[in-house]
Image (spheres, grey):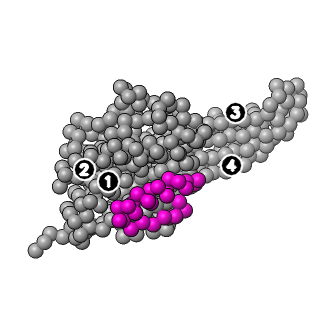
Amino acid sequence: MHDALFRRLDALFPELVEFRRDLHMHPELSFQEERTPARIADFHRSLGLDVRTGVGGRGVVARLEGSRPGPTVALRADFDALPIQDEKDVPYKSTVPGVMHACGHDIHTAGLLGVAKVLSEAREELSGAVVFIHQFAEELTPGGARPMIEDGCLEGVDVIYGAHVHSPADFGKVGVRPGPLMAAADSFDVEITGRGGHGAMPHLAVDPIVTASQLVVNLQQIVSRGVDPLKSAVVTIGALSAGNAFNVIPETARLKGTVRAFDEEVRQSIKEALARIVDGTCQAAGATGRLDYHDGYPAVLNDEAEAARVMRLASELLGRENVQTIEPMMGGEDFAYYLQKVPGAFFFVGGRNQEQGAVHPHHHPLFDVDERAMLVAGKLFISSILDYQRASSPVPA
């Protein structure tokens, strides 16, 4: 059955490319998606599937029932774009100024629709159901996963799989790992208030720039001296702003940063340490500090058995030499919320192709990938569904 479904997916490749490029030309930002979910819903309706729209806000969920009883497998793809100007010289370049698909979500969406079409034509062979989750707003917290879950997208689901095209990896490669895969991703803002004054008379002022500079140094001790060396964590300051004149001590300074961790206890301890160090550093300087901490996505923790399943099936599909147990990444993903509810696995599919010029990183204005990554992800989805259903379905007497 696998081979027949794979051949059918291969035959659909031109249609998938057309759909993907249409999405690429008409990208929509997180929480602003309208055209994209409408197109997705129309596609699923054309297959005769049960379709829900507006799930959790702007999500789309389609359900395919097999002809025999069995487990329910969910597949997820995201469909939002980024606030980046598309600078590629290609016919399918974004037509929306300042907005582009620079992370591959158009690839994810079109590939999942291909899987839906192939399986809808073979529903008589399926045991159980397949739920296609098309998620809005992955790129911008609070994200679309949690409200979609709260709106019932995982109701009755036994297992879930998700894939992400990966520009650093060559086409034909797959990466997955059990357990921690992607980190929890939090952010924070600090406002330091001192007392402004003349740059020539600093003794009459409370300099928030000096305090902010000391705070940046002090925060480096959180990981180096406050976190178990055998556990990974990152505290990064990404922005520091204050004043606009060479001879004026400003009243305020502002910092922006991010916290990344896999272990939830480490994540919480860093949050507490941030508050303590901000307060102590500012008090020592005679300034005041306000910390606004924003909880982001939790860590992506793959189920051990499901990650092993994906690795085994990917090895059968591509050869063991093309499947890698990848190192954990400090990037964030709200697929984590699905994995908190049901077992599953998130994996990466290579999209780099030097000959095609698909060599630029994610979130780059020249980002593009080998579109055949849709076929690799689709075939792994199909294999995972069939393998899980076979293992979970009752054996006939």
Residue at (75, 32) in percent of width and height: 210
Task: Residue under label 4, please give it.
Answer: 291
* Residue at mark 1 to residue at mark 3: CA–CA distance: 52 Å
Badge 1 density bin: few <14, some 14–19, many ≥20, Cα 10 Å: many
Question: Looking at the image, is mark 1 or mark 2 earlier in the sequence?
Answer: 2
Q: Which of 338 and 364 is in front in this view?
A: 364
* Residue at mark 1 to residue at mark 4: CA–CA distance: 46 Å
Task: Residue under label 2, please give it.
Answer: 8
Q: Position of residue 321 (x, y in %)?
A: 23, 35
Q: Which of marks 1 and 2 is in front?
A: 2
Stretch in magenta: 31-58
Residue farthest to the left, as pictured: 397
Is residue 37 among what the camera can see?
yes
* Residue at mark 3 to residue at mark 2: CA–CA distance: 60 Å
Left or right of 258, for residue 351: left
Q: What element carries label 2?
A: helix
Q: Which amino acid does label 4 sit on?
A: Leu
Kindly identify which numbered label has been placed on residue 115.
1
The image quadrant of residue 280 is top right
Question: Looking at the image, is mark 1 or mark 4 earlier in the sequence?
Answer: 1
Q: Where is residue 368 in the image (x, y as percent from the top left)?
A: 44, 35
Q: Is mark 4 on a helix, strand or loop?
A: strand
* Residue at mark 4 to residue at mark 3: CA–CA distance: 16 Å
Residues at circles 3 and 2 in contact by the CB criterion of under 8 Å: no
Kindly identify which numbered label has been placed on residue 213.
3
Residues at circles 1 and 2 in contact by the CB criterion of under 8 Å: no
Residue at (58, 36) in percent of width and height: 85
Is residue 341 among what the camera can see?
no
